[in-house]
Amino acid sequence: MISNDDTIKINQGVLLPLMEAFYTIQGEGFYKGSAAYFIRLGGCDVGCHWCDVKESWDASIHPPTDILSIVREAKIHSKTVVVTGGEPLMWDMFPLTKLLKKNNIKTHIETSGAYKMTGNWDWICLSPKKNKNPLDEAYVRANELKMIIHNLNDLKFAENESNKVNKDCILYLQPEWSKRDKIMPIIVDYVMRNDKWRVSLQTHKYLNIP
């Protein structure tokens, strides 16, 4: 049971529902292959049926954690932090990113863009979902667009979303992991015919790391 005091602090962004935090190799997108400290926050109402971290959805089961302790642990490991979820923008990210910046840590976020963009980010990976579309500001600010491809209709959705982002945004198509053997040849063919796109893989899963 979360106390009223903790609820206030969560709303202020000084406590966050921390599911897990770990130092690993970024497996996806533009920074794949580089070391980073991942902060995974609980809470998500987007509800993708293929989500591989459904245990993140219920924020109430993840302990409200002081951002001071989160950042203290982060700076031991890396100069780059990736905040992910769940959907991290359900929470106010300004206090966390201010503290990370104070410690000279680069701030990356992975988000569906469905909530107001809070925080000071060096890199924004936008991954839109059909269930709950991104807000306009997410398209404007995105550095990369990561579209998860589960079926052929997802390619149509990807094209539609690619027309909304800023001109400098890097475009990625990534196979949904459980369908990768079936979907990957389709993505490869599509990228070869539409070279504005790049292929993204979940290389961390091939490497068997977090």
Image: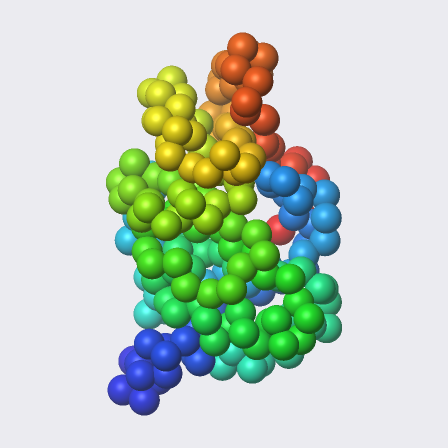
Q: How many marks?
A: 0
Residue 207 falls in which quadrant of the image?
top right
Q: Is residue 148 left or right of residue 71?
A: left
* Residue 51 in sight in this render: no
**Between residues 98 and 57, which one lies in front from this camera angle?**
98
Query: Can residue 31 be seen by looking at this rendering?
Result: yes
- Above or below, 139 against 41 in this view is above
Q: Residue at x 40, y 48 (%)?
A: 138
Residue 176, percent from left and from top: 47, 31
Quarter of the figure that contains the N terminus: bottom left
Colour treatment of the image? rainbow
The image shows residue 83, relative to residue 47, as above or below, that is below
In the rendered image, residue 20, in percent from the top left (x then y), is placed at 53, 64
Where's residue 44, x and y in %?
A: 34, 56
**Does residue 208 lie above or below 187 as drawn?**
below
Quadrant of res 92: bottom left
Residue found at the far front of this picture: 167
Give residue 90's position: percent from left, percent from top.
Answer: 34, 62
Outermost residue, bottom side: 5
Q: State the residue at coordinates (39%, 29%).
A: 163
Residue for point 65% across, 37% down: 203
Instruction: Tell me which corner region of the image, top left, top right, bottom left or bottom right, holds residue 13.
Output: bottom left
Residue that appears at 59% across and 26% down: 199
Most foreground residue, 154 or 145: 145
